[in-house]
Amino acid sequence: MLDIKIWSPSTPGISGTSGGTIAVTDNGDGTYQLTSSDTITHFTLGSNKASITKVQIISEELTSLNLTFAALSNMTEFIASSTAFGSVTDFYWAWRNCSSLTSFPLIDTSKGTNFSVAWSNCSNLTSFPLIDTSKGTEFRSSWQNCSSLSAFPLIDTSKGTNFNAAWGGCEGLTSFPLLDTSKGTDFSYAWQSDSSLTSFPLIDTSKGTSFNWAWGGCEGLTSFPLIDTSKGTNFGGAWSGCTNLASFPALNTSKGTDFSSTWSSCEGLTSFPALNTSKGTDFGFAWFSCTSLTSFPALNTSKGTDFGGSWAVCEALASFPLIDTSKGTDFGGAWSGCTSLTSFPAINTSKGTNFGGAWGDCSGLTSFPALNTSKGITFGYAWSGCAALTSFPAINTSLGTNFTEAFSECSSLKCMQEIDTFNELETNSNTGIFAGCTSLCRPNPTEQAQITSPAGYHWISDVPYMSDCCPAALPNVVTYCLCQGNNCNLR
């Protein structure tokens, strides 16, 4: 038996019916009756669903609510007794995008196993009842983007394995209960962007393998508990944007491989623990914009290949350790904006291909080591804005093709030792290599005329004239100012 009353200005469509047929009757008062004498186990509201404003469940024998009431975006009231839906096991997408609902009734969900996406995007819900979820295993995106919830009940999630994005986007939550998540394996995005949370409980995550973006954007957190992450492999973005975290615990990350953006924009951290990152391969943007870090531990990064942006804008870092980067290929922007660094260690960059912007705007660097850059292809902006550098070592850039503004605004740079082949120097894709290098010089036109240049060589246009550049500095001027065609060996 099925009897459901619907408030709508137009006839509601029915689809996906299982177990018989459903009659739709116009009551003549702006409501419609859905009735059937058959045992209807499933149906979905189809056409004209956006016009439905209210639903009342009178009787039903449903076993699945898969998509049944989804996208009733103008429904402001859903009426059902506490015994309704007692036979339903599948609540997948049941009320997804019911964005006008402000409350939800206490229904019977005791047989439910799949609650994935059930109330996702119910953005106006201000409270949620203590429903029975004791058989639930799937909670993926169940309450995602329920942005008006300020609290959440202590439901039974003891059988839950998948909590991916379960409460992500619940930006109104100020606290979270100590749920039983002991069987959970996937916590990806689980609390992402829950920006009003000020604390987080010591939940059981001992079986968790995936934590990517789990707490990303939880900017209200000031501390974090010592949860069990010993089985975790994916930590990408896990605490990214937790801008008010003042400290971070020594979690077990020994199985972690992905640390991309894990702590990016954790601007309140002043120190970082010596975590086990020995299996990590991706460290791209891992500590990007951790602007208060003053030191960094010598983590095991021996398997790391991607270091792009890893410590960019860590502007308070006064020193950097000699970490193992021997497998690193991407160093693009890795230390860009580390303005407090005055020196840099001789790390192993022998496999590096991308050095674009790697040390850009490291304005405090007064020296730079002779790193192995023999496989480097991209050097655009690599040392741009390193205004305190007065000299530069003879590194190998023989495979390089992109040198756009590589040394631009290195305003104190006076001595450039011989560098292997700036390929395609001063082409459209490699402009401004020495732009703003006001301490480098070339002879004025009169002095240039007195110099016997090798046939076919010309003066690099980026380097400015200086009246006192010759004769004393003439040998060095030739070293860094002469170019032949588009290939400059700086000899």
Image: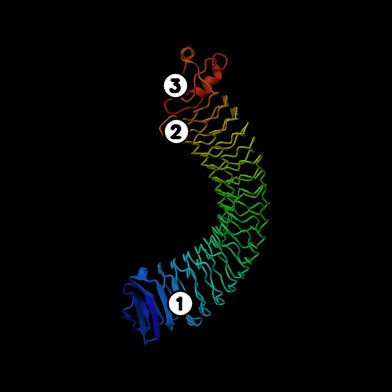
**Image position of 23 with respect to 216: above or below:** below
Q: In which quarter of the image is the N terminus?
A: bottom left
Between circles 3 and 2, the one closer to the viewer is 2
Q: In which quarter of the image is residue 415?
A: top right
Any part of residue 68 in sight: no
Task: Give residue 303's position: percent from left, percent from top.
Answer: 59, 51
The residue furthest front is 29
Could you tell me how far apart the alpha carbons at marks 1 and 2 are, in whole angstroms?
67 Å
Q: Earlier in the sequence, mark 1 or mark 3?
A: 1
Is the Cβ of the residue at disc 3 closer than 8 Å to that at disc 2? no
Q: Name the residue under label 3.
A: 457
Task: Give residue 86's position: percent from left, percent from top.
Answer: 49, 82
Q: Is mark 1 on a helix, strand or loop?
A: strand
Which residue is rendered at x = 43% and y = 74% of the image?
Answer: 66
Q: In which quarter of the image is residue 130?
A: bottom right
* Drawn side of residue 300 relative to residue 261, left or right: right
Q: Earlier in the sequence, mark 1 or mark 2?
A: 1
Could you tell me how far apart the alpha carbons at marks 3 and 2 are, in whole angstroms?
18 Å
Question: Which amino acid does the dot numbered 3 rest on?
Answer: Tyr
**Image position of 347 with respect to 217: above or below:** above
Could you tell me how far apart the alpha carbons at marks 1 and 3 are, in whole angstroms?
85 Å
Between circles 1 and 3, the one closer to the viewer is 1
Q: What element carries label 2?
A: loop
Within 10 angstroms of label 1, few (less than 14), some, or many (20 or more) residues?
some
Question: Which amino acid does the dot numbered 1 rest on?
Answer: Ile
Q: Quadrant of residue 206?
A: bottom right
**Image position of 44 with respect to 476: above or below:** below
Q: Name the residue under label 1.
A: 79
* Drawn side of residue 112 relative to residue 221, left or right: left
Task: Give residue 428's position: percent from left, percent from top.
Answer: 40, 32
